[in-house]
Image (spheres, grey):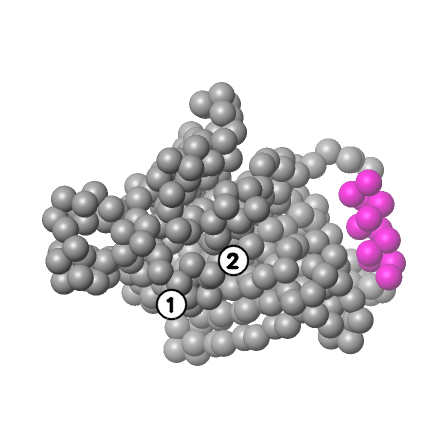
């Protein structure tokens, strides 16, 4: 039985809600690539029309998911391989943006550094090898010699820390610094516990900070910032309803309960307590550190590989 219900930011999980012959998603295309040697899967979900966008609840655009089940185990060679794959996917998305000549790129780390499950953005920013100041000081010859892209970074903080929405801060920086593209890094919510810390999503549609946990903030996309926005995220939390469905659903089906009856029972259990609860794995500190390091390395490989 297909896993449904529960909040998620991952397009690949939303696509799983629909059967292949569902008319509502004829405009949703899926392509998969599998790196067998490292057990890494790359899934590309493309929403191409308004009907597909309405069904999926996501804007028209490209959503790339890189999944490596062993990433949470801490193997350094696998983490670096995932970073290389992410770097290639990021470069392809950048090449498809309307701004063909990208002179400067702003990388934004979203989230609260003091709340570990929400700290992915700031943690990733800490590991970036920013280049804008180097190019300004050492000149165009230095940039060409090391094949650099000029990029700079910002950890925007959250409303409770700064008194400002992260979107307000980012808008001000974009208006002053005039980057050609913004890359926003944020923690996500997943529907499957197996995807926590093992999955990275990249999309060219921008981001709605906090959307996965029902805490919507100002959208960061081309409409609000005036430049293309690529969002990079890793799921760090899961809706408790998901755990109920995964564990109780499997148990009930093993006991011979039909899929229809199982779904009804799970819905009734969820409705009994309307409180929304999100949980995170025990090793969340290491998970966020490793995920931030992986995302940062992917961006560094994309923009300043020869300096690493």
Q: Write down the region rendered in magenta.
A: 260-271
User: Which mark's residue is nearer the viewer, 1 or 2?
Assistant: 2
- Report x, y in % for residue 133: 21, 43
Q: Quadrant of residue 21?
A: bottom right
- In the drawing, does residue 83 fall left or right of residue 67? left
Q: Residues within 10 Å of mark 1 (few under 14, many from 20)?
A: some
- Report x, y in % for residue 210: 58, 39
Chief SS of the magenta region? helix
Image point 86% across, 53% down: which residue? 264
- In the drawing, does residue 37 fall left or right of residue 65? left
Chain-order first, disc 1 or disc 2 = 1
- In the drawing, does residue 230 fall left or right of residue 102? right
Element type at marker 1?
A: helix
Residue identifier under label 2: 204
Compared to residue 168, the image places residue 184 above or below, namely: below
Q: Is residue 269 magenta?
A: yes
Compared to residue 1, the image places residue 114 above or below, namely: above
- Report x, y in % for residue 287: 42, 48
Element type at marker 2?
A: loop
Image point 18% across, 45% down: which residue? 136
Image point 64% across, 72% down: which residue? 29
Residue identifier under label 1: 88
Q: Is residue 126 visible?
A: yes
Find the distance from the CA under tag 1 to the CA under tag 2.
Answer: 14 Å
Of the 4 image quadrants, the one containing the N terminus is bottom right
């Amino acid at each position: 039985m297909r896993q449904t219900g529960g909040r998620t930011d991952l397009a690949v999980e939303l696509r799983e809600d629909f059967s292949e012959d569902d008319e509502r998603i004829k405009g949703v295309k899926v392509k998969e690539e599998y790196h067998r040697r490292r057990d890494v899967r790359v899934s590309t979900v493309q929403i191409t029309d308004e009907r597909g966008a309405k069904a999926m609840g996501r804007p028209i655009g490209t959503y790339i998911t890189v999944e490596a089940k062993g990433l949470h185990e801490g193997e350094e060679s696998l983490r670096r391989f995932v970073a290389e794959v992410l770097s290639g996917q990021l470069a392809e998305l950048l090449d498809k943006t309307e701004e063909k000549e990208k002179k400067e790129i702003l990388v934004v780390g979203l989230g609260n550094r003091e709340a570990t499950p929400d700290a992915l953005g700031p943690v990733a920013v800490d590991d970036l090898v920013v280049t804008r100041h180097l190019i300004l000081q050492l000149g165009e010859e230095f940039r060409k010699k090391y094949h650099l892209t000029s990029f700079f970074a910002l950890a925007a903080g959250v409303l409770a820390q700064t008194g400002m929405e992260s979107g307000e801060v980012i808008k001000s920086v974009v208006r002053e610094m005039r980057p050609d593209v913004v890359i926003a890094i944020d923690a996500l919510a997943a529907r499957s516990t197996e995807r926590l810390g093992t999955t990275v999503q990249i999309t060219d549609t921008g981001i709605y900070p906090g959307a996965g946990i029902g805490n919507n903030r100002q959208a960061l996309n081309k409409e609000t910032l005036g430049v293309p926005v690529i969002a990079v995220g890793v799921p760090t939390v899961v809706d408790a309803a998901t755990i109920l469905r995964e564990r109780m659903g499997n148990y009930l089906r093993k006991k011979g309960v039909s899929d229809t009856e199982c779904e009804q029972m799970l819905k009734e259990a969820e409705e009994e307590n309307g409180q929304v609860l999100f949980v995170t794995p025990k090793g969340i500190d290491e998970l966020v550190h490793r995920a931030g390091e992986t995302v940062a390395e992917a961006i560094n490989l994309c923009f300043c590989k020869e300096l690493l």
